Image (cartoon, grey):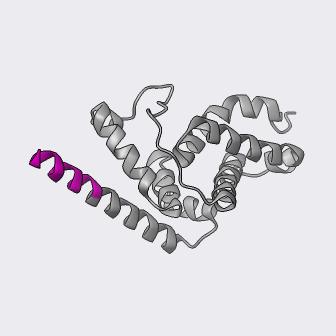
């Protein structure tokens, strides 16, 4: 008879993925650690209920997104770009492997320039590879809003990318 997974075991298994998500949302490791710590400190006292859910990962992922949003609203500050991108333990994804390191940095800076709601939607869609319905549940908005945010975010990234390439060609 196996009960819910112990909190410490779950954090050991899922903590790195939560940190990667928070890093992409916040733009730096220190804020990412704070966001994950805040989410986990809120999850711990409720762990027996959360562990019994169909998808505790999704629930805590939403807690991370909410903690990031709360910090962003409370401090009303812009995220500072970082020098590098935290890579996944398995190595770069297929999409990342097609981009040179300087192109990844350009894309990262462009992501940081997106409004927070668009950045969250784009990150969850393409970095976490979640479906629109899952993102809507995490963000607490209708699926159509998520689709709009992703579409606008991708359009802004493309426009910024094209402008950068034109600027480089003129040099």
Name the residue located 80 percent from the left edge and 30 percent from the top edge: 8
Image-based side of 82 in relation to 21, left or right: left
Give the residues drawn in magenta, as a range: 160-171
Q: Say which of 156 and 30 sits in front.
A: 30
Q: Where's the N terminus, which quadrant? A: top right
Q: Quadrant of residue 72?
A: bottom right
Reply yes or no: does residue 148 show up in magenta: no
* Residue 61 shows in this picture: yes
Instruction: Please name the predominant secondary structure of the magenta segment in the image.
Output: helix
Q: Say which of 32 and 94 sits in front.
A: 32
Reply yes or no: does residue 161 show up in magenta: yes
| Residue 17, image x, y percentages | 60, 36
Q: Where's the C terminus, which quadrant? A: top left
Query: Number of numbered discs present?
Result: 0
Where is 73 relative to 94, above or below?
Answer: below
Image-based side of 38 in relation to 169, left or right: right
Image-based side of 137 in relation to 39, left or right: left
Q: Say which of 6 and 40 sits in front.
A: 40
| Residue 162, image x, y percentages | 21, 55
Name the residue located 77 percent from the left edge and 42 percent from the top edge: 40
| Residue 52, image x, y percentages | 81, 48
Image-based side of 69 in relation to 105, left or right: right
Name the residue located 33 percent from the left edge and 56 percent from the top edge: 157
Where is 128 relative to 15, above or below?
Answer: below
| Residue 30, image x, y percentages | 63, 36
Where is 18 relative to 112, above or below?
Answer: above
Q: Quadrant of residue 22?
A: top right
Q: Quadrant of residue 31?
A: top right
Where is 72 relative to 168, above or below?
Answer: below
Name the residue located 37 percent from the left edge and 51 percent from the top edge: 110
* Residue 95 shows in this picture: no
């Amino acid at each position: 008879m196996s009960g819910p997974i112990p909190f410490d075991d779950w954090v050991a298994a899922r903590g790195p993925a939560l940190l990667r998500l928070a890093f992409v949302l916040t733009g730096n490791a220190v804020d990412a650690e704070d966001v994950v710590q805040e989410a986990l400190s809120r999850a711990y006292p409720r762990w027996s209920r959360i562990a019994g859910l169909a998808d505790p990962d999704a629930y805590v992922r939403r807690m991370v997104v909410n903690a990031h949003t709360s910090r962003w609203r409370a401090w009303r500050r812009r995220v500072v770009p970082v020098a590098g991108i935290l890579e996944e333990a398995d190595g770069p994804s297929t999409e990342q492997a097609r981009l040179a390191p300087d192109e990844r940095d350009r894309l990262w800076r462009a992501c940081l320039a997106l409004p927070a709601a668009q950045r969250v939607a784009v990150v969850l869609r393409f970095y976490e590879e979640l479906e629109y319905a899952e993102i809507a549940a995490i963000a607490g908005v209708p699926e159509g809003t998520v689709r709009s945010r992703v579409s606008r975010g991708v359009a802004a990234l493309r426009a910024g990318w094209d402008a950068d390439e034109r600027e480089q060609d003129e040099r």
